[in-house]
Amino acid sequence: MPKRTMTLNLTDAEMGALERLSVRKDLTKTAVIRQALRLYQTVDSRIEKGEKLLFENDATKEKAELMLL
Amino acid sequence: MTRSVSHIYLLEVATGVGVEAELRDCIEEAQLIDWQTKWQPILIAAIKDLSRRGVARAQWPQSWHWDWRAKIAQMEGLIAFKGFSVICADVTQGLMRVDLNGLGRAPGQEGKPLVYVDYLEVAPWNRMDMGQTPRYKGVGTALLSAAVALSVEEDFRGRIGLHSLPQADRFYRDRCNMIDLGPDSGVQGLRYFEMTPEQARIFLKEEDEV
């Protein structure tokens, strides 16, 4: 699949977060950004359809809704 | 959207000869028409026959109710989902939908990204569980190889995961050497299988040699 290139300007904190995710997820930084975009689009699409994004604590079964603004 | 076509070989069981087929990284209208007009009548006839003979539902082809048109409509415009198809003799021989938002569960792979195989189905005339000799062998393996290759391309190092229908458990465990992580109560009790980067490397090497 042909790919296009862009420059991404990040703060030190954002770059730090990207680097830590890159290590934890065993991904290149580019792959982390692409993965984040896929996930964001998936979540946004479902919220657009009226669904909610919930996190559940496996131990306590407590649920929290994540609001995307 | 650019479509990619790879040339692969399937084994034509009747002749024992390898025949050329296409592996496409898309599912288009022509494939859905094949599913509707060629797969569905055979599957429906088989289900009617099994029902008439009183065969237990657990032994029916377990993907018979899958609606590929709906499954493709659900992923419209979403970059996390991709479809694949195998075409031979101008007829769709297998279909697969994958989700790139999956995360690993196997020991040492927890939380790492993988290609999750949402649905994989081969045409009814290629299925062993339809009580007949399959027409072509290698369709399921070709689709699974495409999932592994996509995982490598996406920097996921070949990791893939899937929930298997009971009739396919042996294929994923024995033929594909995936790790069986047992029944998943969150997904109708289906067994969850995963392929690690090391297993993926061996799987692709073996497929290259076939």
Image (cartoon, coloured by chain):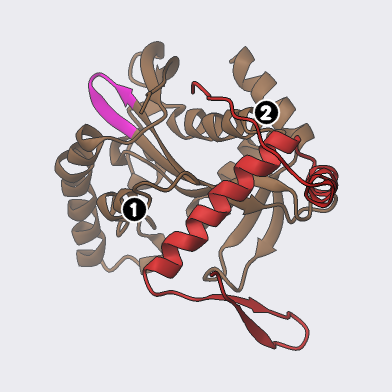
Chain colours: A red, B brown
Would you say residue B177 is visible in this rendering? no
Q: Which quadrant of the figure contains the C terminus of chain B?
A: top right
Residue B105 painted magenta? no
The residue tagged with tag 1: helix, strand or loop? helix
Give x and y (percent) for residue B133.
35, 33
The residue drawn where x is 72% and y is 33% is B157
| Disc number for residue A52 | none
The answer to whether B159 is drawn above or below residue B20 in the figure is below
* Residue linked to disc 1: B71
Quadrant assignment, res B208:
top right
Give x and y (percent) for residue B197.
75, 35
Closest to the observer, B167 or B132? B167
The answer to whether A60 is drawn above or below residue A23 in the figure is below
The range drawn in magenta is B87-93
Residue B88 painted magenta? yes
Report whether B89 appears left or right of A9. left
The residue drawn where x is 67% and y is 36% is A8
Give x and y (percent) for residue B127.
37, 40
> Counting residues from the N terminus, which is met first, the one under dot 1 or under dot 2?
1
| Mark-to-mark CA distance, 1 and 2 | 28 Å
Report whether A10 appears left or right of B33. right
The type of residue carrying mark 1 is Lys
The answer to whether B86 is drawn above or below residue A21 in the figure is above
Mark nearest the camera among 1 and 2 is 1
| Disc number for residue B203 | 2
The answer to whether B90 is drawn above or below residue A47 in the figure is above
The type of residue carrying mark 2 is Phe
> Dot 2, crowdedness within 10 Å: few (<14), some or many (≥20)?
many
